[in-house]
Amino acid sequence: MKIEAAVLRDPGGLYTIEHVDLADPGPGQILVRIAGTGFCHTDVLPRVPGYPAAPPIITGHEGAGVVEAVGPGVSGIAPGAHVVLSFDSCGRCDNCLGGHPAYCAHMFRLNLTGGRSPVSDEEGKPLAARWFGQSSFATHSLATARNVVEVDRDLPLELLGPLGCGIQTGAATVLVALRARAGSSVVVFGAGGVGLSAVMAARVAGAATIIAVDLHDNRLDLARELGATATLPGADPDLVRQIHRLTGGGGAQYAVETTGSPKVIEKAVDALRPTGTVALLGVQSGPLVLPPTALAQGKNIMGVIEGDAVPQSFIPRLVELWRQERFPFDRLIRTYPLSAINDAERDSASGVTIKPVLLPGS
């Protein structure tokens, strides 16, 4: 079928809106008409020189929409269903069977290579279009039964896409991976979409002290409105001491690091109390070298993908928290028409917009 998609043809170029051909859903696949899709920093990876998922490519991996057709072998979901699209997984490896699909043995191949293409351009040439099993910067997407989550039809579907990745990652890191305890202390480094989702989740968990750290005052202001009990400027040379002061002198029990900066990671480790844990969410931008005693006193570092969430159970949990006005993720969102994808990417990179959401139908 003919669809419209934002295609990245050059690593250093702009997205172009093109008419392309999308194949019919095959075995295990689901055709979704996209209502909205979030722009995530991970979507810029194909711009990195040498990255395996090379242009020409259709990215986008925070889609939400309406099921229009299902392929052979799909059960439990029918045309007309409203769905959120999340990451793909095989469902057969030890980690998938153990309830940890974000650590699927085939995670990289299924999500971050562009995959075998169901899309061709107007000249009949294939485009990489299996980004996170969806490539949702388009009017329509082919997903799989493994990476769709059905949601109620009375929800604002066009806003739900970011629940499938960035918002899920921040929130589930606190609630699932770290299992933050009520009355504990949480410090979040980086108050973007992922970090602010962690702040909201820390409030849901009942943390007594929630500290947000960022370079932008407007983000720190929003962090306070969303549940942070204190905020600190990231450039403060006395940052670690301030965190210890705010946590009663001992340091934070949990730290969520979203920037990927080795220098920030070092500060996150220093900010921990004995037995504390820092969760690393950002793509690390360089080698990490810690002092020999950095992890003494039982300090822990854990890498986290997608918050270690099972989307089919965690996304409905976030929706219910939103209904209860305890997780107002919609306050992070600004919408753009799909044709303004280059503006959305610019605003995301500059920090002007915390979470851009593209609306293909507008």
Image: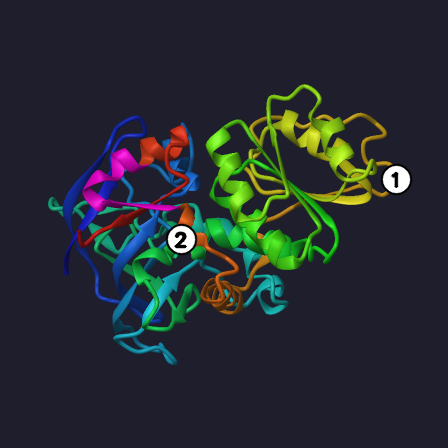
Q: Residues within 10 Å of mark 2 (few under 14, many from 20)?
A: few
Do the CB atoms of the residues marked 2 and 1 lie less than 8 Å apart? no
The three-letter amino acid code for the residue at tag 1 is Gln
The residue shown at (85%, 43%) is: 298
Q: Nearer the viewer, residue 292 or 358?
A: 358
User: In the drawing, does residue 304 fall left or right of residue 130?
Assistant: right
**Residue 12 lies in quadrant:** top left
**Residue 63 lies in quadrant:** bottom left
Task: Say which label, 2 or 1, has the lower sequence index.
Answer: 1
Is 59 drawn above or below residue 67 in the view shown? Answer: above
Q: Which quadrant of the figure contains the N terminus?
A: bottom left
Real-space Cα separation, disc 2 to disc 1, in angstroms: 40 Å
- Residue at numbered disc 2: 330
**Residue 249 lies in quadrant:** top right
Residue 306's spot in the image, x, y percent? Answer: 54, 52
Q: Residue 204 in magenta?
A: no
Outermost residue on the bottom side: it is 76
Residue 286's spot in the image, x, y percent? Answer: 59, 26
Closer mark to the observer between disc 2 and disc 1: 2
Residue 297's disc number: 1
Magenta stretch, residue numbers: 333-344
Q: Secondary structure at mark 1?
A: loop
Residue 195 visible in the current orientation: no
Residue 313's spot in the image, x, y percent? Answer: 52, 69
Q: Secondary structure at mark 2?
A: helix
The residue shown at (60%, 62%) is: 100
The three-letter amino acid code for the residue at tag 2 is Asp
Is 7 drawn above or below residue 71 in the view shown? Answer: above
Q: Nearer the viewer, residue 229 or 254?
A: 229
